[in-house]
Image (cartoon, rainbow, N blue to C red):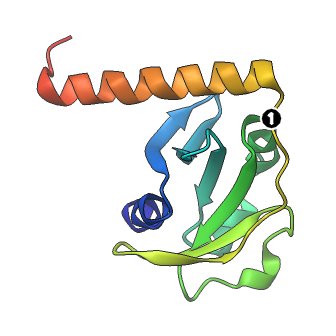
Amino acid sequence: MQRGVGRVLVALGFAPVEEMVLAGGLRADLMALGPGGEIWIVECKSGAADFRADRKWRGYLEWCDRFFWAVPPDFPQAILPPEGGLILADAWGGEVLRLPPETPLAGARRKAVTRGFARAAALRLNGLRDPQP
């Protein structure tokens, strides 16, 4: 599903990074940097049990301008909290069904998150070219 969500984000002009580690040890399924510097986090849920077992999702809200749930077409969407947007996706693509409210990051937080995002993306790209530590 992450690949399909990544394709949706790229089509919207965003640059996604999967499995982005945030301060405090949180790990976002996808974080994306938009053309205007906006930061989105997407949490992928494969089913209702996966969603119910997740107690950390509110921690993502302080690290992004918009937070989304990404779920497969057969997911029971009514159980998702309204604080998040909604992306319907599979391995091949998807679509944004609902935009969440925007909660802009403070300047210092935005700078720190953007810097961490850039470093993670650059290090991963370098790792593809040179897998030796």
- Residue topped by disc 1: 105
Residue at far top of view: 133
The residue sitting at 74% across, 42% down in the picture is 60
Q: Is any part of residue 133 visible from this angle?
A: yes
Above or below: residue 64 compared with residue 92: above
Query: Relative to residue 21, is residue 97 drawn left or right?
Result: right
Write the residue at 15% across / 22% down. 131
Q: Few, some or many C-alpha atoms within 10 Å of disc 1 (few <14, some 14-19, many ≥20)?
A: some
Q: Position of residue 100 (x, y in %)?
A: 79, 64
Please state which of residues 98 and 130 is positioned toward the viewer in this rendering.
98
| Quarter of the image with the N terminus in it | bottom left
Q: Furthest residue to the front? A: 36
In this view, the residue in front, 45 or 129, is: 129
Q: 92 or 77: nearer the eye?
A: 92
Which of the 4 quarters of the picture holds residue 36? top right
Question: Can residue 50 be spotted in the picture?
Answer: no
Asked which secondary structure carries label 1, the reply is loop
Please name the residue shown 21% across and 10% down the image.
133
Question: Hey, which residue is sitting farthest bottom in the picture?
Answer: 74
Numbered disc total: 1
- Relative to 18, 71 lies left or right: right
Image x and y of residue 15, in percent: 45, 46
Q: Amino acid at mark 1?
A: Leu
Q: Is residue 41 above or below residue 27?
A: below
Q: Where 56 sits versus 9, above or below?
A: above
Q: Where, by quadrant of the figure, is residue 51 drawn?
A: bottom right
Q: Can you give x and y, in whole percent of width and height, for residue 30 in the image? A: 52, 48
The image position of residue 8, as x and y in percent, is 46, 67
Left or right: 36 as drawn, with respect to 72: right
Residue pictured at 66% horizontal, 64% vertical? 69
Q: Is residue 83 left or right of residue 122?
A: right
